[in-house]
């Protein structure tokens, strides 16, 4: 089979799976029943246990990638439509929360120094003070990042600011 034929085969298989998505169980009870039925097929020798394990790992990887690929679409649809009602009809609850802030690339000297000192200390009287200082500095840096300003240290150095993380859409399946 040439690469183009193989691609088309995967493309049509994916389209078929997407069409069947509404039939995938969405309640905890039905998910358990589905898993038990699949395990029974393995126990009865209808399906190879090793083949099932390989397919499960492939599904996990495919679903993780699909989740990443549609993340922005889900957020857009959540904001734009009554998807919450559709999810509710399926018995699920969908909520949207802010993703917080990423301080990994933030090189603010005051923050870096306070975090390093806190990490080096065992609990003592200064620990609570440093935790308070770190919390206040992070809040300050978030405010500056939101306003488009620049962060300056006491020495007048320019610091890179934290970046906002993407909103998180949480789906809670019914029991």
Image (tube, grey):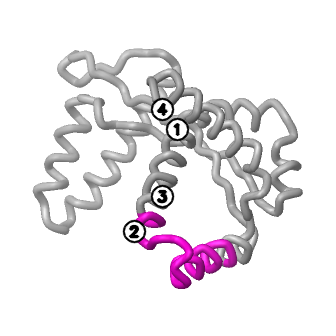
Quick one: quadrant of the C terminus?
A: bottom right
Earlier along the polypeptide chain: callout 4 or callout 3? Answer: 3
Judged by its main secondary structure, the magenta piece is: helix
Q: Label 1: which residue?
A: 68
- In the image, residue 47 lies in the stretch drawn in magenta: yes
Q: Alpha-carbon distance for marks 2 and 1?
A: 27 Å
x 35%, y 38%: residue: 137
Q: Please say if the residues under marks 2 and 3 sit with CB atoms less than 8 Å apart.
A: no
Nearer the observer, 32 or 169 = 32
Q: Label 2: which residue?
A: 50
Span highlighted in magenta in the image: 33-53
Neighbourhood count class around disc 1 (C-alpha, 10 Å): few under 14, some 14–19, many 20 upward: few
Q: Alpha-carbon distance for marks 2 and 4?
A: 42 Å
Nearer the observer, 74 or 40 = 40
Q: Please say if the residues under marks 4 and 3 sit with CB atoms less than 8 Å apart.
A: no
Q: Is residue 122 rendered to the left or right of residue 13?
A: left
With respect to residue 67, does 163 lie above or below? above
Residue extending farthest to the front is 1
* Numbered circle sitting on residue 8: none
Mark 1 against mark 3, which lies toward the viewer?
A: 3
Q: Label 3: which residue?
A: 55
Image spot of residue 54 (x, y percent): 41, 59
Mark 2 against mark 4, which lies toward the viewer?
A: 2
Mark 4 against mark 3, which lies toward the viewer?
A: 3
């Amino acid at each position: 089979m040439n690469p183009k034929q193989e691609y088309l085969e995967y493309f049509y298989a994916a389209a078929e799976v997407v069409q069947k998505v509404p039939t995938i169980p969405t309640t905890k009870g039905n998910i358990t029943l589905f898993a038990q039925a699949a395990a029974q097929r393995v126990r009865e020798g209808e399906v190879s246990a090793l083949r099932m394990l390989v397919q499960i790992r492939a599904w996990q990887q495919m679903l993780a990638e699909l989740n990443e690929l549609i993340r922005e679409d889900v957020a857009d649809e959540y904001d734009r439509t009554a998807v919450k009602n559709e999810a509710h009809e399926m018995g699920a609850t969908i909520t949207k929360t802010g993703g917080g802030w990423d301080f990994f690339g933030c090189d603010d000297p005051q923050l870096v120094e306070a975090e390093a000192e806190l990490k080096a200390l065992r609990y003592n009287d200064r620990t609570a003070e440093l935790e308070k200082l770190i919390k206040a500095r992070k809040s300050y840096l978030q405010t500056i990042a939101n306003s488009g300003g620049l962060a300056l240290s006491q020495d007048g150095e320019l610091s890179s600011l934290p970046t906002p993380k993407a909103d998180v859409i949480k789906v809670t399946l019914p029991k």
